[in-house]
Image: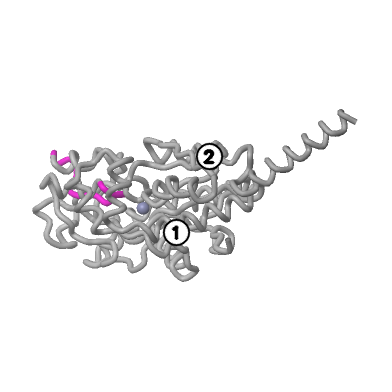
Amino acid sequence: MKRKTTALLLALVLGASAVSCGNSGKAEGNTIKIAYLPITHSLAVLKEAEDLEAQTGMKVELVKYGSWTELLDALNTNRVDGASVLIELAMKSKQEGIGIKAVALGHRDGNVVVVSNDINSAVDMKGKTFAIPHRQSSHHILLNDALATAGLKIDDVNITELAPTEMPSALASGQIDGYCVAEPFGAMGVSLGVGKVLYNSEELWEDSICCGLVLTDKFIAERPEDAKNFVSSYKAAGNSLTQEEAKKVAAKYLSQSEEVLDISLKWISYNDLDITEDTYNKLVDKVKEYGLSDNPPTYTEFVKNDF
Ligand code: ZN
């Protein structure tokens, strides 16, 4: 009799703890691992990491990387559950058979073409050298768009791939004549006085897409409820990121001066982070037109918008 009572008590205790776990995510493995680079383009996911645990008990483990190559390697081998990443890089991975889905935008607008002080219009770009972080990037597309305003093509300039952190000093030393890259490195060049903004992204490409929030198919399949909570909380975090809030998050995660952040955060916003079919198709057109890829994934194959 005593043994039975103990068993019953144990069952009640276990039952009670299962209920309480149900309210706060899974007892085990309630963490989602998200890869990011310390740039303003990742601020929505950094902000979400702070909000999500308080709201749902689910933890975001942020994994910082120093380069897109390292970040992509982690994403492509399921060492993380998702990432805030240049969308063209993720599209390329998807094209090569990696199981990932884009579930939201990283940000809206927020890129600039920075040029040396002696370049005054797109025509002056001819024959000069420009840096981009990666061939598979919206920065490459924006450079093409900038040249197109003067009837020029990418072959009319020299393109070099550089690490974002090296671009302002490369411009200062004359090694390059301009660059386009994730922020705040454009703002850094402006702040240092080594360059100026020739174009903001929205002047070249309305509703441009740059970074995307990507989740692995494995995570979505194994933890659909967590994936749903994560994505809706992410979008809410984006909507709450006013310039002031963004600055607070940036101050915590990015080692940048207040002056650089003040310049950079004027160019970007984080509201309405849905990836619409229309804006994605425009990206696909540009990816094909400018030779980034002949066969990028379609919206249906790559974007998951039904959480
Ligand atoms: Zn971006």
Q: Is residue 181 magenta?
A: yes
Give me the C-alpha separation between circle 2 and circle 1: 22 Å
Left or right: 223 as drawn, with respect to 166: right
Which mark, residue 171? none
The rendered magenta stretch, by its main secondary structure, is classed as: loop
- In-front residue for pair 196/159: 196
Mark 1 — residue? 236
Q: Classify residue 67 by image quadrant.
A: top left
Image quarter of the N terminus: top right
Q: Residue at x 84, y 34 (%)?
A: 5
Relative to 200, say whether 1 is above or below: above
Q: Residue furthest right?
A: 1
Q: Nearer the viewer, mark 2 or mark 1?
A: 1
Residue assigned mark 2: 80
Q: Is residue 246 visible?
A: yes
Which percent across, then down, holds residue 139? Answer: 32, 53
Where's residue 286, x and y in %? 40, 63
Disc 2: CA contacts within 10 A as few (<14), some (14-19) or many (>=20) = many
Q: Amino acid at mark 1?
A: Ala
Q: Considering the numbered disc 1 on the image, is that residue within a helix, a strand or a loop?
A: helix
Residue sitting at x 76%, y 40%: 12
- Magenta range is 173-184
Q: Earlier in the sequence, mark 2 or mark 1?
A: 2
| Image coordinates for residue 256, horizontal then vertical, percent | 23, 41
Query: Is residue 129 left or right of 69 when viewed as pictured?
Result: left
Q: Position of residue 112 (x, y in %)?
A: 25, 56
| Helix, strand or loop under label 2 | loop
Identify the residue at horizontal 63%, vertical 45% (top origin): 218
Nearer to us in this view, 13 or 34: 13
